[in-house]
Amino acid sequence: MIPTERIEAKYYKYKFHFVSFPEELYFLHGYINGNDIYINKNDSMELQSLTMIHEVVHAECDDGQDLTDHRPIKTGRAEFFADHIASRDVRRYLA
Ligand SMILES: [Zn+2]
């Protein structure tokens, strides 16, 4: 299996869509809407893999698990966290 397939198999709860984003959104690598995750299929395999995990981290962590506090992680922190986890975990799939 290629890395993106391995990540799909691991996170089977999500539906990954590999699409071309409009030209104006060339800078966008991924987008999440509920359990649907859209990945820019024109990116490299490494970047697609990284983006997949990045979006999964958002899905699983941004709302927080502490139900006594509904405040979402502030956007900047959420991005930093998602990037951190993704760059750590992606190595398992690219190996
Ligand atoms: Zn993000």
Image (cartoon, rainbow, N blue to C red):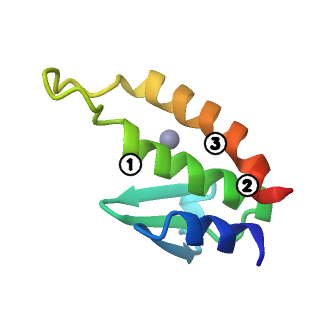
Q: Which mark is residue 86?
A: 3
Of circles 2 and 3, which is in front? 3
**In-image side of 45 versus 78 (left or right):** right
Mark 3: secondary structure = helix
Describe the element under mark 2 as helix, strand or loop: helix
Q: Which mark is residue 59?
A: 1
What is the three-letter code of the residue carrying label 1? Ala
Give residue 79's position: percent from left, percent from top.
Answer: 51, 32
What is the distance, in whole Å, between disc 2 and disc 1 at their CAs? 18 Å
Label 2: few (<14), some (14–19) or many (≥20) C-alpha neighbours in 10 Å: some
Task: State the image quarter where residue 39 is shown.
Answer: bottom right
Label 3: few (<14), some (14–19) or many (≥20) C-alpha neighbours in 10 Å = many
* Residue designated by label 2: 47
Q: Is residue 46 above or below residue 84?
A: below
Q: Residue at x 61, y 53 (%)?
A: 51
Q: Position of residue 9 (x, y in %)?
A: 58, 72
Amino acid on which the number 3 mark rests in the picture: Ala
- Please identify the quadrant where the C terminus is shown: bottom right
